[in-house]
Image: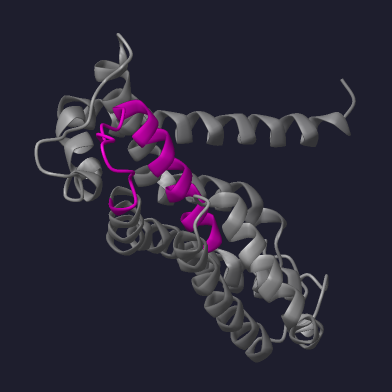
Amino acid sequence: MSTSSQPLISHLMELRNGLLKAIFSVLLIFIGLVYFANDLYIYVSQPLKEQLPEGTSMIATGVTSSFFAPFKLTLMLSFFIAIPFVLHQIWSFIAPALYKHEKRLVLPLLCASTILFYAGIAFAYYVVFPVIFGFFTSVAPEGVTIATDIESYLDFVLKLFFAFGFAFEIPIAIILMCWAGVTTPESLKAKRPYVVVGAFVVGMLLTPPDIISQSMLAIPMLILFECGLLIASLYRPNTDNNTVEE
């Protein structure tokens, strides 16, 4: 085996070990939470149940839905909780290749991205869900009984959790693009009208087809876009420190 291939194999081994540790962390959290799977589902379904008309409830139309819906939710929740450790594994893998000034920037960004992802999920659960479920249940035609399937509900809320979680990462994406030289804050400011339209298009694609939920995703995205511009404008990489830390 040539010596030139050894560093590549070493990096691949590090990547594999990091992935295995990340998967193990998710499974470990899952084992600790699976006993409470039904309780977790009850908590996540609360925003809809509070809006259901009196005398109605959620239903399970599939033979295995009552088992797999809480199981799937617990697995996804385990991944959400393990995100800090997963990001730490990513950081450990890329850190040796970064410059000193890049390390000082990336570590706070990893922490901020975790907090923003959690903030997006919390915003969806505590702010968006009560509004959109209240809207949907109020516009049901007369004589129609609302009985939402538990698996359909879970797919719906997980989609919104991911949509809002990743949408809240906009400041991090802007900072990284400006830091890497892909764009500049001034260029992004000039494209602000297109960003506004794009935010509502993304809101339309990622949320239910009503203006309320679309706006509740698009408006935070625009606010976060402005925050990302502000932070990116304040940060200017110091090219004098481009030395890799040993």
Q: Quadrant of residue 98?
A: bottom right
- Residue situated in front as seen by the camera: 108 or 219: 219
Residue 15 is left or right of residue 86, and the answer is right
Q: Residue at left 90%, top 25%?
A: 2
| Residue that extends furthest to the front in the rendered view of this protein | 142
Q: Quadrant of residue 238?
A: bottom right
Q: Position of residue 128 (x, y in %)?
A: 36, 60
- Residue situated in front as seen by the camera: 243 or 148: 148
Q: Position of residue 194 (x, y in %)?
A: 76, 75
Residue 102 is left or right of residue 119, and the answer is right
Q: Quadrant of residue 229?
A: bottom right
Q: Residue at left 60%, top 83%?
A: 226
Q: Residue at left 89%, top 34%?
A: 4
Q: Is residue 178 visible?
A: yes
- Residue situated in front as seen by the camera: 66 or 239: 66
Q: Is residue 118 above or below residue 191?
A: above
Q: Is residue 39 above or below residue 163?
A: above
Examine the structure image and report whether residue 153 is included in the region drawn in magenta. yes
In which quadrant of the rendered image does the N terminus lie?
A: top right
Query: In terms of secondary structure, what is the magenta stretch mainly?
Result: helix
Q: Position of residue 182 (x, y in %)?
A: 83, 70
Residue 131 is left or right of residue 173, and the answer is left
Q: Is residue 63 above or below residue 32?
A: above
In which quadrant of the rendered image does the C terminus lie?
A: bottom right
Magenta-colored span: 138-167
